[in-house]
Amino acid sequence: MKRSEDLIAKQGATSDTFQEVLARRIARRSFLKGALLATPLLIMRPDQFSKHLANAAEGDGLNFKSIRLDNRDRILVAEDYRADVLIRWGDPVFRDSPAFNPLTQSKLSQEHQFGYNCDFVSYLPLPYGSNNSIQGLLWVNHEYTNEKIMFPNYDIQNPTQTQVDVGIAAHGASVVEIRRRASNDWQVINSSLHNRRITGETEMEFTGPAAGDALMKVSYDTTGRRVRGMFNNCGGGTTPWGTVLTCEENFNQYFANRNGLADGPIKTNHTRYGVGSSVSGLPASRSERGWEIFHDRFDLTKDPNEPFRFGWVVEVDPYDPTFVPKKRTALGRLKHEAATTVVATDGRVVVYTGDDERFEYMYKFVTSGKYNSSNRAANFGLLDQGTLYVAKFNDNGTGQWLPLVHGQGNLVAPTFISQAEVLINTRFAADAVGGTKMDRPEDIEINPVNGKLYCAMTNNTSRGIGSNPAVNGVNPRTGNRHGHIIEIAEDSNNPASLSFTWEIFLLCGNPATQPVDSPAPTLGAEATYFGGFDPSKVSAISSPDNITFDRKGNLWIATDGQPTTFGMNDGIFAVPVEGQNRGFLRQFFSGVIGGEVASLRFGALDQSLFITIQHPGEPGTGPNSANSSFETPTSVWPDGNTPPRPSVVVVTKQVGKGSPVVGS
Ligand code: FEO
Ligand code: CA
Ligand code: CA
Ligand code: CA
């Protein structure tokens, strides 16, 4: 019997206590004893973390010696590897780009330079369809901007138009060609005709059911089919046909003045998505960056529909620098995190995506049409027709994908008058059909070896607290501040299945802390679980965020939150998911002060690992960071002087050019 079937078969349907059900969901192995205990909240000193620096056993290829959590302003990587900065905020993207000068920034220069806060990174080999490990395109999202550490003497009360326009231009994405030289390092090719900057002003199109809907029309686009720019592109993915899916996440923060709107459905929607909320310390009519001061479309009282045109998955062909980006509305409007594509058994295409906010949902989209492997162009409209589903997790380890289809169930008039409105109001549709509210669903990725889905729940300190939703089987910790990872097997191992089984793979935290009993029947915030592996041998980890797999099927995890939970820098951790070392998690890489490790992707043949370091020196991220500014930043990485610069880092083997990062 398959593992999950075995678990279900052994289970009594009605007589189990919650804790028994939970224990069965995570107690696949016998190491559970001692792993499910809670400890008080505390910030750890470096010497309080596990001192085990174990080497891996053979088989999974993870032969590195683990490193320790770090709190200095530097990157660290495991012995025998090198980590090099490949491209930084402000670096030239084109041959004629101006050199970076933080004192003379302009919209025009930023439009020709690498953008800010690099996030989703992907390596696309050149030429298309090859497996070239030394020449390819690098796609990088630019999620958001940190004006206080970007600009000298920045005054949040009175941003200048230059600062606003640089900020808009620093959003979006970059495509740059990169080549690996004989000396073993990677280089950006500024003269490549592939290179491109996409910004908050780049013309894009809507496609799919919501394109042209009345809610999508604004003063500068009365067709509801064209839009300027994409914002807060955080996670993403690539398709089997070589396009990038880049995901708009916290788009709400760019809009101002919700209180100036009349009560009604539009205001209700904007409230649910957090659009136009007031910002602490600023007038009620202000957004954080003040873009509405110079650009009317960000003022809700002038263009109340503009936010409906953000929060989508955007498809871009990185091999065609003239491609008009397409916002694929069939995939729903939410704070998208990840868009992981896989071809189902019958050839239809499935895209998994999460909505990264506390108590929001996980989704998947299944196309109506089938993937055409012999005609690339035939796939470019695939994502415009199909069905969007929201995940429902049952405490017994099963689950269903519930369709969000107008006319079915509760998705009917007068609340929803069309499929376009179901998609524009995806969160309300998911509420209406009864999806399961999760602990910040961030990345969802498919293991290329065992075919299972791994889903990172970054954290949710509100879970089970006060009047917030209580713990459930799949979100089992009260005040879940360290996050967890869920393992899902679609029924029949078919991504298009409408039912699945699941179990908890990791409950993150520091297993070296002193355990104390948690109040039954719930687990406290500090309870940990590592796939059944001996917790005394693993690295401490908090806030799993973005994940990927090497070719052997090991899970690689980047974190976003350790400065807050541990008082230590974020990092990268690797862990086998199968075999005797399932759950043997070790730290491979450490980031810098105030910066998350935002994304990680292997290049062709796993010879390089591309990593994005986002928001180094961010005000409010990590200890003593509230006053971090251009003048007094908490980080001066990577150049040793201000301003800190979000950058892409590439990790390779120190010896033996062309050796894979994993295995020999
Ligand atoms: Fe932009 Fe969900 O992190
Ligand atoms: Ca992210
Ligand atoms: Ca994140
Ligand atoms: Ca981030």
Image (cartoon, helix red, strand yellow):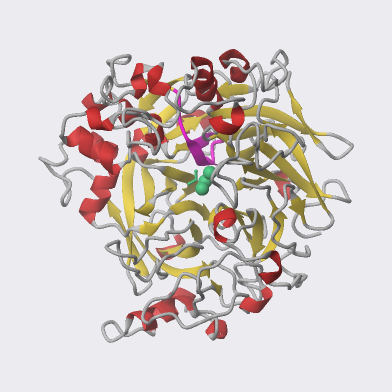
Magenta-drawn stretch contains 237: yes
- In the image, 8 versus 72, the foreground residue is 72
| Residue in view at x 32 percent, y 84 percent | 17
Count of labels in the image: 0
Give the extent of the magenta segment: 229-245
Q: Is residue 165 above or below residue 370?
A: above
Where the C terminus falls, by quadrant? bottom right
| Residue in view at x 58 percent, y 22 percent | 197
Judge from the rendering whether residue 26 lies leftward or rightward of residue 634; answer left or right.
left
Q: Is residue 646 above or below residue 344?
A: above
Magenta-drawn stretch contains 433: no
Spot occupied by residue 617 in the image (x, y as percentages of width and height):
63, 41
Spot occupied by residue 630 in the image (x, y as percentages of width and height):
63, 31
* Residue occupying the far left of the picture: 414
Any part of residue 660 in sight: yes
- In the image, 661 versus 382, the foreground residue is 661
Spot occupied by residue 368 in the image (x, y as percentages of width and height):
35, 42
Q: Is residue 636 above or below residue 109?
A: below
Judge from the rendering whether residue 338 lies leftward or rightward of residue 581; answer left or right.
left
Spot occupied by residue 229 in the image (x, y as percentages of width and height):
45, 23
| Residue in view at x 31 percent, y 45 percent | 387
- In the image, 230 versus 399, the foreground residue is 230
- In the image, 475 versus 605, the foreground residue is 475
Any part of residue 131 in sight: no
| Residue in view at x 67 percent, y 71 percent | 48
